[in-house]
Image (cartoon, rainbow, N blue to C red):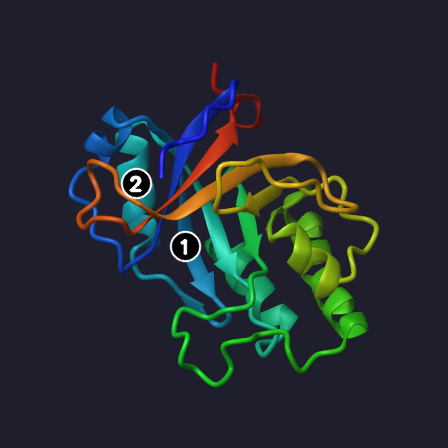
Amino acid sequence: MNQPNIPGTVLGIDLYHQDSVASFHNLYASGVRVAGLKLGEGGALDPKFNEYALRCQEANIIPFAYWFVRPDVHVATQSALISGNLPQGMALALDLEPSLENSKDSNSDRWQNISQLKRQSWLSGLVGSFKVTRSEHPILYVTADFWANVFGAPDGYQTCPWWAPRYNASEPEQAKNLYPWEGWQFTDSGSINGLNGANNADLSLWRRDFWGIK
């Protein structure tokens, strides 16, 4: 799809070890200014994170980390992996979407068999741990519907930046009890010069001010 025209935004891309990057400099030349890099999932780290972070910096692309949250892995385990491997000064996004990478996995709906109260308690523990260790708020990646229906749109997260997936031409509808979107993932099937393969790029728009881009 075509990139939405939203004033005051820049293009971002999401990358992890299964993505084949031909050239980070070509990504920059194609307009990419921000890259979300998978730090890990549950109890495992992504093997390409450190390499991709370095190559982003070499190409003047701002890297940030994202973490696939797994409710079947203890909060303390995930918090320790995040705090021990997230570079100082790098932002973190917590990915709360339901599906695992392998959609055929019987546990692909991560939150299905957990009560809403437990989901809220679990998320509060993970966010709270990050705020204590880093003195900042993590970005939350979640759709407005999933936030309302699965997590119950709990209060207390208005200061967490919101990264909203919405794959159509209209901006994300405001999620209850979340800050207005700073990032909008507008497609998961984009094509861009610098990434090998067609129609496989996760692309987002990000507010320039959020990243301090003039």
Numbered disc 2: secondary structure: helix
Name the residue carrying label 2: 54
Q: Amino acid at mark 1?
A: Lys
Q: Of 161 and 142, which appears nearest the observer?
A: 142
Q: Residue furthest top?
A: 214
Please state the horizontal and vertical placement of residue 206, each as a whole percent of the image. Answer: 50, 31
Residue 70 in sight here: yes
Numbered disc 1: secondary structure: strand
The residue located at (60%, 62%) in the rendering is 79
Please state the horizontal and vertical placement of residue 49, each as a whole percent of the image. Answer: 34, 53
The residue located at (72%, 68%) in the rendering is 122
Residue 86 in sight here: no
The residue located at (36%, 39%) in the rendering is 1
Question: In this image, 47 relative to 92: left or right?
Answer: left
Q: Residue furthest right?
A: 155
Please state the horizontal and vertical placement of residue 158, each as a whole percent of the image. Answer: 76, 42
